[in-house]
Amino acid sequence: MEKKTALYNKHVSLGAKMVPFAGFEMPVQYSGVTEEHFAVREKVGIFDVSHMGQFFVEGDSAKDLLQYVTTNNLDTLENGKAQYNCLPNGNGGIVDDLIIYKMADGKYFVVVNASNIDKDWNHLQKYNEKFGAKLTNVSDEMSLIAIQGPKATETLQKLTDTNLSEIPYYHFTEGTVAGVADVIISNTGYTGSGGFEIYFKNDDAVKLWDALTDAGQEFGLIPCGLASRDTLRLEKGFCLYGNDIDDTTSPMEAGLGWITKFDKDFVDKETFAKQKEEGVTRKLVGFEMQERAIPRHDYPVVDTDGNVIGKVTSGTMSPMRNVGIGLAYVAKPHFKVGSDIFIQIRNKSVPAKVVKTPFV
């Protein structure tokens, strides 16, 4: 039985195409992927992202626990700041990628991927036996709306006295939005077009969705689904758990060395330090098709002689660029920028080139 978010009936009434995703019935699209994609890049779009998981980690040992189970360094996290991070699994892979919000000393708010809520919770519990922090899983009680795009700030500002221009990227505050108190207002998102994510109690979901929809009307706001969320994040080269990173990929292979800090002790530190020193044998790279073709998840990547050298983890036709783009794990030395590779599409080797991300 798939779960429903507090906005399920709203999506159905808006004519969204609903699909099962990560244990939830979620809107995959409303008016169409391309229209929704361009709305976010040029104006503003609204997403229901309430399927994501949320935990509170509190107490004197909260920081010590999180510091040990993650790769990034929490010492740089001051109150009101968020941090992108990941949980190593103890075998050199990734349990999940997540965002950690520092609410106060000894109080952290952790946002995890929907498909990994139970897995992450159990992982934290296992390590917490040693630390004894207070863990609370509030995933079923909280909703999350993302307002994304160049007009997102103006849209949200109409509904709150909180000065949004004073919240830098990857920072947050708590405030009142459309009369709803204690909303976490976060300058984060998964589209690369700017905007905010707001967290609040389920009971206020419909009220906030409607208020935001009304506020954004003059800017051309439209509701957006999972499909455009995927094309938007892919154009920016953002990883999607389950596709581009998982329990078999290391942060060093995935290009997440920038969130892997060796000035602290953490799970898998030695493994990753060795990879950093010796280099990795495969790497997650961005690539662009050199002919008109759409790469898809799991398509093989081959060299000039047809030898398999990797596989596509995410792929699409870029709405902004109108070319096929993707992410793939590619073996050394083919992962260098500028390398010519081939994507096997229906037994045909279609030429592609390794490029720097973001694509747009």
Image (tube, rainbow, N blue to C red):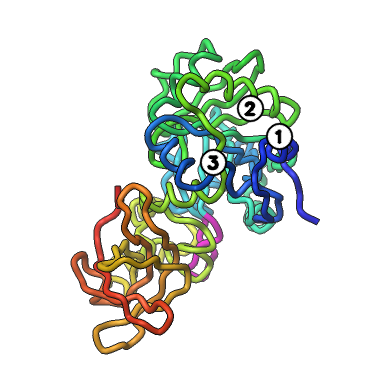
Circle on res. 209: 2
Q: Which residue is drawn at the image coordinates 18% and 66% (left, top)?
A: 338
Find the magenta span and give its range: 87-96
Q: What amino acid is found at the position of numbered circle 3 in the picture?
A: Lys
- The span from disc 3 to disc 1 (Cα, nearest Å) is 38 Å
Query: Which residue matches tag 3?
Result: 63
Query: Which residue matches tag 1?
Result: 10
In the displayed structure, 163 sits above or below 46; it is: above
Which mark sits nearer the N-terminus, 3 or 1? 1
103 vs 179, nearest the viewer = 179
Q: What amino acid is found at the position of numbered circle 2 in the picture?
A: Trp
Which mark sits nearer the N-terminus, 2 or 3? 3
Which mark sits nearer the N-terminus, 2 or 1? 1
Q: Looking at the image, can residue 125 be seen? A: no
199 vs 134, nearest the viewer = 199
Q: What amino acid is found at the position of numbered circle 1 in the picture?
A: Lys
Q: Would you call the spot at circle 3 few (<14 residues within 10 Å), some (14-19), or many (20 or more)?
A: many
Mark 2 near mark 1, Cβ–Cβ under 8 Å?
A: yes
Q: Which residue is drawn at the image coordinates 43% and 47% (left, top)?
A: 232
